[in-house]
Image (tube, rainbow, N blue to C red):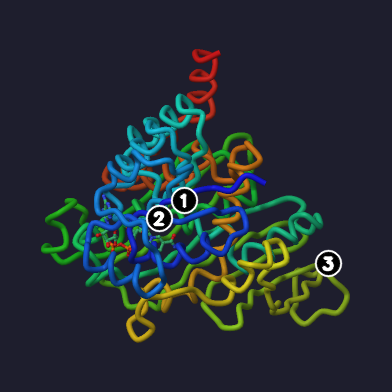
């Protein structure tokens, strides 16, 4: 089997991924790029890496097969396009970009490079999402009637690029499970801003809303999806969650708990809860498996824990949400497999663009007092690009 050379860019949250790549049987070597030289050398000496870069462009000139970008939000577009244009496969943490132009640009760069692009969306590889996917595959949902995604997180005190960010500009964790499971193509969105934001938090992005709440309509589908996202001045624990209501069974995950549990509502004879007069609904809390059997044995353990530089001061994303509910090694495995199997990853450029654009268009709607904003047809754009390159 061909083995891959991987570069990790950004070692704060990114530091959780290097050891997973290093342990993966399809990886020959991992090199690190971090512009903070002190962090780079500390990480390298603790975990044993010797190919180190502080300059991203220099790293791209080497013989790496792929890079995984885990830098701050404003840099995702630029670093992604550079990687693809340098002939590297590229994984990038969420969001894909911060404007529709950036999303189109990445789709174009991916198509022209012929390399794989994957947005590393944690929320579709969580214990909870795997459970809902199984229900779906067993046909338990039948007709979806409605979906809801929530994501509450207070970003006070995080790096400066977060300060005052429009909540819907970082909404993929609420959007993605819904679009992934339903396979719905989002067509338009309406959104309102909610609450009162400290004027100092409005200076950077001109965003007056601590919370935004949106409704998405889908192409040729009868259901809608509601999304609610808070980022500032909201007293709530960290929660990512989603609900799928269908005619036969429903799924709900709206609290963080350990071990991970969700609620399922199903038609059934052994009823614990009263449904409508003609139907009875059985409600139960289900334990979610981590699905590590889908992974090479060398990285299965990373569904249960992750590597951190300083256990006394772990990255907030580990404390909040239990290292993203076991998702990290699943994302790494999917990215590497897409390269080795020469196929698009589950979250390819077009899919990632839809998942990110829902939030970008939602915030645009909020700034226009809830006007309906169409979501671009990225499939059509991608098809046009392919017809030009044929
Ligand atoms: N669940 C998730 O998917 C999830 C969770 C947390 C963070 N994120 C994403 O990951 C990103 C990174 O998170 P973080 O908390 O580590 O951010 P951070 O800003 O604290 O750290 C980013 C690191 O990247 C380095 N860096 C920035 N530009 C660089 C460049 N050009 N070359 C080399 N190094 C560079 C910085 O020096 C810094 O150490 C976030 O902005 C967010 O988009 C996603």
Q: Residue at x 58, y 65 (%)?
A: 126
Above or below residue 117? Residue 174 is below
Q: Is mark 3 within 8 Å of ligand 1?
A: no
Q: Depth check: 246 or 101 in front?
A: 101
Residue appearing at x 49%, y 20% in the figure: 385
Task: Work out how far the residue at label 3 is from the one at label 2, CA to CA, in angstroms.
Answer: 62 Å
Q: Position of residue 340 (x, y in %)?
A: 62, 42
> Disc 3 on helix, strand or loop?
loop
First-in-chain label (2 vs 1)? 1
Q: Secondary structure at mark 2?
A: strand
Q: Label 2, on which residue? A: 31
Q: Which mark is residue 6?
A: 1
In the image, is the residue at mark 1 within 8 Å of ligand 1 by its beta carbon? no
Residue 330 badge:
none
Residue 146 on image: x %, y %: 61, 54
Give coordinates of residue 211: x percent, y percent: 32, 62
Label 3 vs 2, first from the N-terminus: 2
Above or below, 253 relative to 141: below
Relative side of 24 to 236, left or right: right
Give the residue displayed 28% in from the left and 58% down from the top: 34
Pointers 1 and 3 in contact (C-beta within 8 Å): no
User: How far apart, in angstroms, are the residues tagged by discs 1 and 3?
Assistant: 58 Å
Ligand 1 located in image quadrant: bottom left
Cβ atoms at labels 2 and 1 below 8 Å apart: yes
The quarter in which the C terminus is drawn is top right
Residue position marked by numbered label 3 in the rendering: 278
Q: Are marks 3 and 2 in contact (CB under 8 Å)?
A: no
Q: Quadrant of residue 312?
A: bottom left
Say if residue 362 shows up in the picture: yes
């Amino acid at each position: 089997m061909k083995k891959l050379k991987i570069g990790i860019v950004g070692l704060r949250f990114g530091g959780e991924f290097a050891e997973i790549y290093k342990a993966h049987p399809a990886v020959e070597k991992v090199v690190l790029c971090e512009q903070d030289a002190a962090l780079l050398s500390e990480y390298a000496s603790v975990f044993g890496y010797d190919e180190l870069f502080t300059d991203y462009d220099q790293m791209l000139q080497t013989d790496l097969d792929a890079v995984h970008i885990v830098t701050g939000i404003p840099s995702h577009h630029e670093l992604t396009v550079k990687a693809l244009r340098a002939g590297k496969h590229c994984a990038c943490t969420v969001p894909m970009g911060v404007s529709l132009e950036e999303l189109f640009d990445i789709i174009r760069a991916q198509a022209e490079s012929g390399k794989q692009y994957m947005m590393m969306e944690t929320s579709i590889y969580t214990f909870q999402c795997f459970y809902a996917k199984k229900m779906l595959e067993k046909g338990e949902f039948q007709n979806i009637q409605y979906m809801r995604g929530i994501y509450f997180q207070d970003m006070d005190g995080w790096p400066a690029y977060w300060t005052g960010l429009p909540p819907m500009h970082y909404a993929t964790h609420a959007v993605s499970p819904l679009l992934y499971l339903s396979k719905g193509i989002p067509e338009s969105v309406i959104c309102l801003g909610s609450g009162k934001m400290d004027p100092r938090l409005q200076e950077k992005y001109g965003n007056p809303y601590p919370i935004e709440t949106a409704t998405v309509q889908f192409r040729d589908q009868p259901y809608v999806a509601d999304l609610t996202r808070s980022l500032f001045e909201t007293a709530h624990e960290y929660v990512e969650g989603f609900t799928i209501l269908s005619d036969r069974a429903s799924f709900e995950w709206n609290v963080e708990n350990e071990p991970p549990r969700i609620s399922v509502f199903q038609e059934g004879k052994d009823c614990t809860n009263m449904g409508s007069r003609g139907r009875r609904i059985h409600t139960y809390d289900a334990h979610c498996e981590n699905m590590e059997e889908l992974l090479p044995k060398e990285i299965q353990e990373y569904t249960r824990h992750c590597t951190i530089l300083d256990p006394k001061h772990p990255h907030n994303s580990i404390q909040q949400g239990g290292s993203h509910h076991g998702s990290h090694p699943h994302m790494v495995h999917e990215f590497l497999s897409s390269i080795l199997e020469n196929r698009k990853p589950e979250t390819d450029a077009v899919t990632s663009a839809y998942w990110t654009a829902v939030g970008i268009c939602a915030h645009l709607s909020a700034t226009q007092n809830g006007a309906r904003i169409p979501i671009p047809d990225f499939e059509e754009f991608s098809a046009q690009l392919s017809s030009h390159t044929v």
